[in-house]
C-alpha cells in the first residue's frame, strides 16, 4: 500500500494473500533463464477462462508464442521491444468474434450483430478480463508479466503472423517469465484514490490537486529509483496523445479493424 | 477445475489460494443483508489501481453507488436488473479520458490523440483490467460480484445520472455484496481449452468438436442445476447477435460515444 500510493497509505484489516499479490504488481521486463513449470500455460488459461465473459459468449482467444523466430518478428512489430524476444512465453490476447462467425455460417443463422462496435467492445473487454486473471495467476506463482500494447501498432501484420481468421484482433500481448533477481522491478505509485474513485456521482474537483501531488510523487520516485525522469506525469502523458503522429501507427486503427473484418458501425 | 471444465479436469501442482479464488468464480446476483466492512471500497480500488494501465495513463475511473434511488434508476437503464437494486454496492467502471482532456486544456498543450479509437480502446481496456482486479479482490474477501453490460444500453442517460464529464463512458457496472447463502450461485463450465488456446498460430480446427461438446456440457449443467435450458450454447449465443434489434439498444453505440465527446476516428 505504501509503495502504491507513497502518500496516505491505508492498512485495512481485510488484506489477504490474493490482494497482496495484486498490490505487489510491477511490470517485469527482465527474466531469469528459469524455464516455466509444466502445466503453467494451461493453469493460466484456466484462470483466464474463469473470468466473467459477457453473456457467456467467450469472445476471446489467446495465442501462446514460444518460438524464438516468431517472438523476434512480433518484437519488431511492437516497436522492437527487447523483452518480447527475451521472455520464455509471449501471450497474445485476441478479441475473437471469429468463433461465433464460423458457427453462424455453419448453422446458417443470422449474425449481423457481430459487425457492430458493441460486439467488438464485448470481445475486447472479454479478452482484457481474461488476460488480467492470467496476469494475477502468473504473479501468484512467482512469475512476472508485462502487457504489450504495441501489438496494436501493426494489426494486420500481427494477424498475419499469428494466422488469425477474420473477426479476430490482437488486443495486446503479455510477456511471461520468472523475474531476473539481478534486475528487480519496482511497484509504481498511482494517482491518489481521490482522482479515480467517485461517490454517487463523478466529482472532478480533486483532480488538480491529485495531479500536482502525483507529479511530485513520480518525480521523487524516479529520483529514488535512479530512473530517467521524463518530466511531470501529466505533461508526459499528454505528449503521448498529442496527435495522430504520437500514436505509433494506431491512428489508423479503424482502417485496420475494417481490414480484419470488423465494421464498427 | 472439475466444475470449470466438467470434462478433462487438470490438477496442476502449482494451484494456490489466489488461483483457487479465480477458478471458484461464479456470478452472484443474490445477496445477504450483511453490510460491507469498513474500508472494503478503498481496498477494492487499491487492487484496481494496482492493475497494469497503458503507459501509466490511468485512463479509468469508478463511481461507487449506494443510494437506493440512484441504484433503482440505473437498474431501469440496464433493462430492469433486480440485482442492481439489491446489491449494497454498485460500481460503475468508466473509460475515462476526461482527466487528460482537462489537464491538456489546463496546460494548453495538444491532445488530439484523445479523439482516436485507440485512446478509447486504451481507456476501455484500462477500465476492464482495473475492474477484474477489484472482482478478484472482492471474491478473495468472500464477496460476490456480477458484471453488468447493461450499462451500455443507454450510455447518455447513464452518463447524465452519474454526472460524467465529456470523454468519459461507463464501460460496465458491477454489483458487489455478500452472497445469499440460501441462493448459492454455481461455477459455470467453459469451452474446452482446445477452442481458446492456440500454440504459435491460431488453429480453428478444434472449434467444431469443442462447440458440440460444450453444447452437451451446458445442457447437462442446466439439467443438473434445474435451470432453464435455453437451447444449444452456440445457437443461443448467436441469437444474441443476430442483428441490431438483438443488441438492447447498443446498435447505436457509435452515435452514443460521439454524443459523449469521443470521435473514434
Image: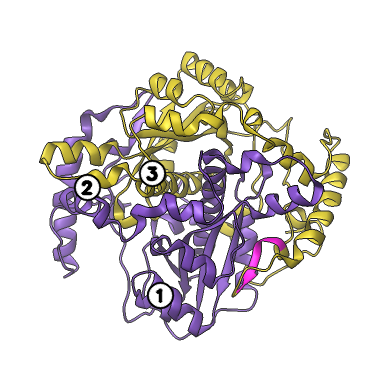
Chain colours: A yellow, B purple
- Report if the CB atoms under discs 1 and 3 are less than 8 Å apart: no
Categorize mark 1 by other alpha carbons within 10 Å: few (<14), some (14-19), many (20+).
Answer: many
**Is residue A225 depicted above or below A196 in this figure?**
above
Nearest to viewer (mark 2 / mark 3): 3
Distance in Å between CA atoms under marks 1 and 3: 24 Å
Residue at 34%, 53% (x, y): give it. B251
- Of all chains, the one bearing label 3 is A
Residue at 82%, 61% (x, y): give it. A209
Q: Do labels 1 and 3 share a chain?
A: no
Nearest to viewer (mark 2 / mark 1): 1
- Residue B75, numbered label: 1
- Residue B173, numbered label: none
Residue B107 visible (yes or no): yes
Categorize mark 3 by other alpha carbons within 10 Å: few (<14), some (14-19), many (20+).
Answer: many
- Residue A120, numbered label: 3
- Of all chains, the one bearing label 1 is B
Residue at 37%, 43% (x, y): give it. A265
Q: Quadrant of residue B39?
A: bottom right
Considering depth in this image, is B99 or A51 the residue closer to the camera? B99
Distance in Å between CA atoms under marks 2 and 1: 37 Å
Q: Identify the element where label 2 is drawn.
A: loop
Q: Mark 2 vs mark 1: which is more N-terminal? A: 2
Distance in Å between CA atoms under marks 2 and 3: 30 Å
Residue wearing tag 2? B7
Q: Is residue B181 left or right of residue A144?
A: left
Considering depth in this image, is B228 or A33 the residue closer to the camera? B228
Categorize mark 2 by other alpha carbons within 10 Å: few (<14), some (14-19), many (20+).
Answer: some
Amino acid at each position: 500500500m505504501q509503495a502504491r500510493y507513497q502518500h496516505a497509505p491505508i492498512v485495512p484489516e481485510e488484506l489477504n494473500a490474493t490482494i497482496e499479490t495484486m498490490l505487489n504488481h510491477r511490470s517485469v521486463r527482465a527474466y531469469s533463464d528459469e524455464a516455466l513449470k509444466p502445466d503453467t500455460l494451461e493453469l493460466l488459461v484456466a484462470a483466464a477462462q474463469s473470468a466473467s465473459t459477457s453473456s457467456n459468449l467467450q469472445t476471446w482467444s489467446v495465442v501462446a508464442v514460444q518460438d524464438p523466430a516468431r517472438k523476434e518478428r512480433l518484437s519488431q512489430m511492437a516497436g522492437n521491444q527487447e523483452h518480447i524476444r527475451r521472455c520464455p512465453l509471449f501471450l497474445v490476447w485476441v478479441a475473437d468474434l471469429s468463433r461465433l462467425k464460423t458457427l453462424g455460417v455453419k448453422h446458417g443463422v443470422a449474425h449481423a450483430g457481430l459487425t457492430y462496435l458493441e460486439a467488438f467492445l464485448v470481445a475486447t473487454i472479454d479478452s482484457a478480463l481474461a488476460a488480467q486473471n492470467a496476469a494475477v495467476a502468473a504473479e501468484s506463482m512467482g512469475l512476472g508479466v508485462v502487457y504489450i500494447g504495441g501489438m496494436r501498432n501493426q494489426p494486420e501484420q500481427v494477424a498475419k503472423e499469428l494466422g488469425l481468421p477474420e473477426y479476430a484482433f490482437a488486443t495486446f500481448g503479455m510477456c511471461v517469465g520468472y523475474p531476473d533477481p539481478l534486475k528487480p522491478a519496482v511497484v509504481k505509485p498511482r494517482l491518489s484514490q481521490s482522482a479515480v474513485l467517485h461517490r454517487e456521482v463523478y466529482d472532478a474537483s480533486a483532480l488538480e490537486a491529485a495531479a500536482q501531488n502525483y507529479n511530485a510523487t513520480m518525480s521523487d520516485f524516479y529520483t529514488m529509483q535512479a530512473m530517467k525522469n521524463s518530466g511531470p506525469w501529466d505533461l508526459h502523458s499528454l505528449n503521448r496523445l498529442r496527435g495522430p503522429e504520437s500514436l505509433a501507427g494506431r491512428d489508423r486503427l479503424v482502417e485496420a479493424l475494417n481490414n480484419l473484418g470488423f465494421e464498427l458501425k
